[in-house]
Amino acid sequence: MADQVASARSYDASSIQILEGLSAVRKRPGMYIGSTDTRGLHHLIWEVVENSIDEVLAGSCTEIEVRLNSDGTCTVIDNGRGIPVEEHPKYHRPALEIVLTILHAGSKFDKNTYKVSGGLHGVGLHVVNALSEFFEVRVRRGGQEYFQRYEKGTPVAPLSVEGKAEGTGTEARFKPDPTIFETVIFDKEIVERRLKELSFLNPQVTIHFADERDGTAATYHHAGGISEFVADLNAGKNVLFPTPIFLHAVREQTDIEVALQYNDGYNDTTLAFVNTINTVDGGTHVAGLKSALTRTLNDYARQRNFLKSSEDGLTGEDVREGLACVLSIKVLEPQFEGQTKAKLGNSEVKGQVESAINEKLAEFLEEHPSVGQGLISKAVQAAQAREAARKARELTRRKGLLEGGGLPGKLADCHSRDPVECELFIVEGDSAGGTAKQGRDREFQAILPLRGKILNVEKARLDKMLQNEEIRALLTAIGTGIGDELDLAKLRYHKVILMTDADVDGSHIRTLLLTLFYRKMPALITEGYVYIAQAPLYRLQKGSKFQWAYSDEERDKTLQEWGAKGVTIQRYKGLGEMNAGQLADTTMKPGGRELLRVTVDDAVKANALFSILMGEEVEPRRQYIQEHAVEVTNLDI
Ligand code: 0RA
């Protein structure tokens, strides 16, 4: 029998406070974790893991293990100091109980001064506890092992001593509450990507990951930190110089680290972190980085006569062509903005980052002239290509290729001019495009059919991309422009909907389009304007009744409800197999359809898949195709 550390207490003032706190979290979970969708769900893991990372930053923890278990729970184990179990001086309960029911992470008194505030991170373990069907915690500390179980945030028994134990550490196992979350299935790719990221950002720690649901496991340890992160971003690419440039500086209280390395491609992959949080929407720190790069490389180019003083300077896009970069800063009081709290707002940070990188990068280039030279000639080439692209654009404009008020001829536009209600369906192939045109509501639904495979944006520079008719039609229809000139105010449709067949070609085109958006018009995705239409896979009929099924599971469910006898099942392989009325009812009409909003996670996945499928390296592509041989039968790349 386990000893009891504290006996059950009466319903005193502190327990009332605890219950009120927990019910506030359960009533408005979004206030604490942003949302109750898959993003909010994963916040539960991040919250626990960040507590373990705090132990790493305090120098007390070297190993973290994260397990996704077959029963839908997640386990996080660390060898940190262990959550304190001693009686809390104010509440007269074990400190652990306070940490799991009221205390905010911000009130933890440790050495890590770069605590996160204003964001969704660091909201406290009590939030995870409150939103879990159950939460079990095991602590090794002071030679003993302790255990306590909570359900929906409330302890079901007092903290118990389980026996003697060596070392220190914390183990938490929790099951997200399905009455709170829209989905309670953890996505291994999201978890793995974040753990890998954390291992680059915290080079001291080793992170083990295991997914018991499919038996896979991985270990992440990157002693090289963000330099190794950049090398990883460039894996499989031809790099301009072998070792990433690493710069470090402190401005006022802000700690600034950046690693960067160029490849011979045309894209810019810059990742930015504030107190280890991935700021996917950028912010003042990214603005500072961009200004510094442009300014320093222009100064350098002019000083060394790579640019004549009369010539136009290099633009931001020129100096970021082929760039892989990780910026990691630590800010004392970060202000996170935007719907997903993924954008840094502190205005003072722009100048701090800009001045630090200006100084350190100039110094580096001074000391490494061969790196500087390679990097500048790449940027100068980019500038020349940009000029060629401008000329090509002007030429097409003069030739009048973009007729009808500049809109592409293949676009069947809608009548409404109010972008908020307008929808653009991007449809694969002219035949499905024709059906969609008949089935649409022409008041607010526009159709753009795309023929064949659009250009491989991995290997094409901007000027070449703009020569491609399909891409030009797409960009003109959307209206925002791309790259640094992207202007969401000019977006012509607030829903840009990808409608492709449910086959390999369809998924290929979808991957391509998502990658194009992600790389050239990321705000379209982060602001939630991009959707994927869901076409049905089956039509089931029995007598006079019929039902659409959008997945094998749905088909089987209907079969079970109806009884399989006398049911005819028609399978739809492509959009073209439906008539206009069917396509409208099942896939296009608000009310009848189900649209999936594309998240940054989806786009990141598409981008990674795309690099594998389209990149320079043959081996990863061969491996992918081998592993996915069943799905990828007809890949034409
Ligand atoms: C409160 C105070 C201290 C550590 C922790 C909580 C803590 C929480 C978690 C969650 C997962 N692993 C954790 N490890 C520690 C400070 C401890 C001290 O000063 O001894």
Image (cartoon, helix red, strand yellow):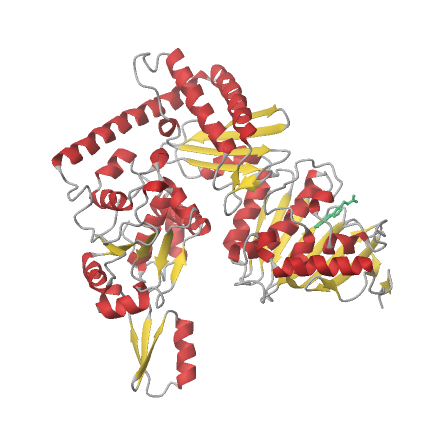
* Residue at 42% over, 47% down: 527
Tell whether 577 sits left or right of 420: left
Q: How many marks?
A: 0
Residue 178 place in picture, x, y as percent: 58, 66
Decide: is 37 above or below 315: below
Residue 130 place in picture, x, y as percent: 67, 60
Quadrant position of residue 308:
top left
- The answer to whether residue 243 shows anywhere in this view is no
Decide: is 201 above or below 309: below
Residue 537 place in picture, x, y as percent: 33, 69
Front residue of this view, candidates 159 and 374:
159
Front residue of this view, candidates 355 and 192:
355
- The answer to whether residue 503 shows anywhere in this view is yes
Residue 458 place in picture, x, y as percent: 33, 41
Quadrant position of residue 318:
top left
Decide: is 626 above or below 475: below
Decide: is 242 above or below 127: above
Instruction: Quadrant for the N terminus, please.
Output: bottom right
* Residue at 27% over, 57% down: 445
